Image: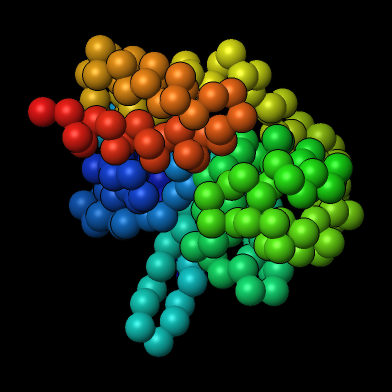
Amino acid sequence: MIARLRGNVLEKSAEDAVIDVQGVGYRVNLSAIALGKLPAEGQPVDVRIRTVVREDAFDLFGFLSVPEEELFLLLNSVSRIGPRMALGVLSGMEVGELIAALARGEVNRLAKIHGVGKKTAERLVLELKDKVKNIHAEAVARGTAAPPPVAPSGTKADLISALLNLGYKQPQAEKAADVVTEKLGPDATFQVLFRESLKVLRSTP
């Protein structure tokens, strides 16, 4: 199984990226947040990989840190949470923020993540509240602890950066970020803001 890819970013979309490793392009599914952090096309990147094999598919899921990968595995272990759903949850918050929300049992906050809802959020908290604490403790011991949650004031900057990394121009990215942050307010997750920004950009002639 593929465990890691080290190469150059060949192309990026809103859902995945193609990593060129010695002339072979690997399509990798990443969270919206991870996609926003990827370097520009043509630049080197090192991505941790989890391979999911089914009868009709061979999917690669990518992560930029050990805690992100470990949290994906925990999310995927929850009943009725598949790998794509797990990636969707990771798209809703930064890793450190998500760990904190699960550890504190913040059901209402988790329910705001696109595709989650209250019942799923309750199940996530019930099954992972104690387990996620181990991720943080182990990350601290390794010196790879996830960064603290991004302050609301920094969300727009992160959003603009993610859009720039997808190839949009600075004025386009700033305008889209202004529109969606004003429309959706400070409680909107990064995933929602990112998705709505892409809608704004695609509808702009």
User: Can the viewer see residue 186 in this picture?
Assistant: yes
Foreground pick, 139 / 30: 30
Residue at screen point 81% across, 64% down: 127
* Above or below for 116 versus 43: below
Q: Residue furthest front?
A: 183
Question: The C terminus appears in which quarter of the rendering?
Answer: top left
Whole-percent x and y of residue 161? 40, 22
* Above or below for 126 versus 34: below
Q: Residue furthest left?
A: 205
* Above or below for 129 versus 170: below
User: Can the viewer see residue 138 in this picture?
Assistant: no
Residue at screen point 39% across, 40% down: 195
Whole-percent x and y of residue 28? 38, 55
Please give left or right for residue 203 compared with residue 63 in the image.
left
Please give left or right for residue 51 compared with residue 94 in the image.
left
Please give left or right for residue 160 compared with residue 10 in the image.
right
Whole-percent x and y of residue 90? 58, 48
Q: Residue furthest bottom?
A: 55
Foreground pick, 112 / 8: 112
How many numbered circles does the render carry? 0
Foreground pick, 191 / 44: 191
Residue at screen point 17% across, 28% down: 204
Whole-percent x and y of residue 35? 42, 39
Name the colouring of the figure. rainbow
Residue at screen point 54% across, 24% down: 185
Residue 101 lies in what quarter of the image?
top right
